[in-house]
Amino acid sequence: MKNLSAFPPLSTVTLNPAIDRAVTVSGFAAGAVNRVEASADRAGGKGINVAATLAAHGYAVTARGFLGEGNAALFERLFVRLGIADALVRLPGETRVGIKILDPVRKETTDINFPGLVPSAEAEEKLEAQLRTLRGGWCALSGSVPPGMAADVYARWIRLLAEGKVATVLDASGAALRSGLAAGPTVAKPNIHELEECLGRKLPDARAVVVAARETLRAGGRLRVVSCGA
């Protein structure tokens, strides 16, 4: 572990975690019988992945957000193994499972994503109370917003965290990205398709991407990173 006094507090927020179930099917074909050659489950969700990467590189990080109490063990083992502080608010029920069908023949991945648990107003208040106490450091707000939560929740929390001088990283899509960018996150990382959807226009070349990324900085923030696929 790195010298904690040398690094600011780091947190991630995952509102809609998932167990990523990767199944390998050579020559996968829709509408046909497919035989699974291998299968593996992994604790996932964008914010969980960010926390795991930070911890694997020696940084102290706290995972925040929601987690179904019915199948939390896979996540809890990951946190213990990597030394991630677990501050996830537990919800009744089970965290969703996302299926990834890996086809090594066609070199394709097919994603099948299930909806997440619906957090109660009380659970949302518990998480927001955590964020309200943070002072300084960084907080990454990543992934989809679960059913029943307002699409502008990231925007609200970006402003809340700014009151505590917490720098924010936003990685979302759709309405959550659009409203979140308007709140001026310190860093945002849309992909090119998400940015096109957010701004309502095509970005045909690198210059158009740069112009669009700079446009999103008008509301505030310091950096925009746009991933453009292969």
Image (cartoon, rainbow, N blue to C red):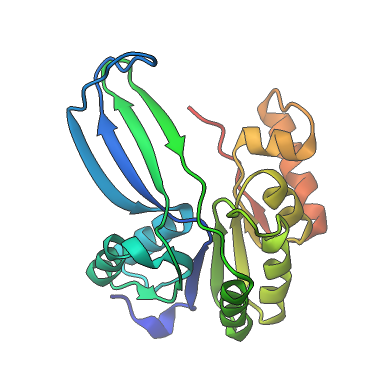
Is residue 221 left or right of 21 when viewed as pictured?
right
In the foreground, 202 or 26? 26
Q: Residue at x 47, y 58 (%)?
A: 47
Q: Is residue 205 above or below residue 71?
A: above
Q: Tell which residue pokes out farthest to the left in this image.
A: 37
Is residue 180 left or right of 46 when viewed as pictured?
right
> What quarter of the picture does the N terminus occupy?
bottom left
Q: Is residue 58 above or below residue 44?
A: below
Q: Residue at x 41, y 57 (%)?
A: 95
Q: Residue at x 26, y 22 (%)?
A: 104
**Residue 62: % across, % down:** 43, 74
Q: Quadrant of residue 109?
A: top left
Q: Quadrant of residue 29?
A: top left
Q: Tell which residue pokes out farthest to the front in this image.
A: 93
**Residue 173: % across, % down:** 63, 45
Q: Is residue 175 above or below residue 35?
A: below
**Residue 158: % across, % down:** 68, 67
**Residue 177: % across, % down:** 68, 49
Q: Is residue 185 visible?
A: no
In the foreground, 15 or 154? 15
Is residue 192 left or right of 229 when viewed as pictured?
right
Q: Is residue 84 visible?
A: yes
Q: Residue at x 60, y 72 (%)?
A: 124
